[in-house]
Amino acid sequence: MFLTKDEKGILLLIARQSIESIFEDFPSMPEIDYARHPSLALRTGCFVTLNKHKQLRGCIGYISSNTPLGETIWEVAKLSALEDPRFPPVTSEEVPRLLIEISVLTPPVPLTNYNDIKIGVHGLILDEPEAHGLLLPQVAVENHFSSNDFLTALCQKAGADPHLWRTRFLNIKTFTAEVFREEQHRDLTGERK
């Protein structure tokens, strides 16, 4: 998948307006000209990650979606702000300080060999009867993971024994993601620089 700079900007605007709409009176998401931006009509998985002061503040998404990408971003941005069980809901005072990152996913494919994992390229999905989890490709880069570290972190995120992957070959799928974020930095008062 390839999104233009304009399309990335539209998706980031949709995500920001979605979060702002929690606290302000926005009737619905902005109109999208799908004829001009057909990529935004694609039905694909995506995640919205929220960071505040370089710390994770929320991240939720879908591996796949039956709605157009723009609408999916509108939905998961709100979920990231309000429903990530690791964090309390975002407050209105925090909104200006949030930096938004979007990951648009390719369809997952089964992993046939652990050695095929490419750090910085692949995200991982664990799909076992007793454990389910997902890590985006950037997680491995941000944490300086090796492939082994990435597999351990995936099992841990899924609530399984962190070394389960060493005991048997697990049902893991890989995907890639087009990742982009807001470029504007904000100082501690929330003002745009």
Image (spheres, rainbow, N blue to C red):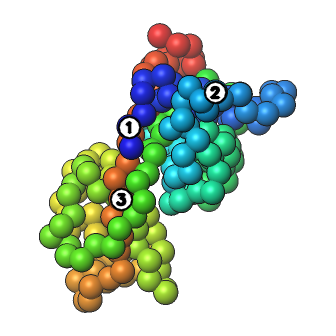
In this picture, is 124 found above or below 87? below
Rendered location of residue 27, percent (x, y): 84, 31
Q: Could you say where residue 3 lies in the image, as x and y percent from the top left?
A: 42, 34
The vertical placement of 173 against 8, above or below, is below
Residues 63 and 96: in front is 63
Q: Is mark 2 on a helix, strand or loop?
A: loop
Q: In which quarter of the image is residue 12?
A: top right
Residue 129, horizontal then vertical, whole percent: 49, 87
**In the rendered image, which residue does mark 1 sit on?**
2
Q: Mark 3 points at which residue?
A: 175
Quarter of the image where the N terminus is located? top left
- Front-lying residue, 134 or 144: 134
Question: What residue is shown at x 42% (from left), y 60% (from top)?
Answer: 107
The answer to which of marks 3 and 1 sits earlier in the sequence is: 1
Q: Which amino acid does label 1 sit on?
A: Phe
Give the total of numbered labels: 3
Residue position for label 2: 33
Q: Which residue lies furthest to the top in this view?
A: 193
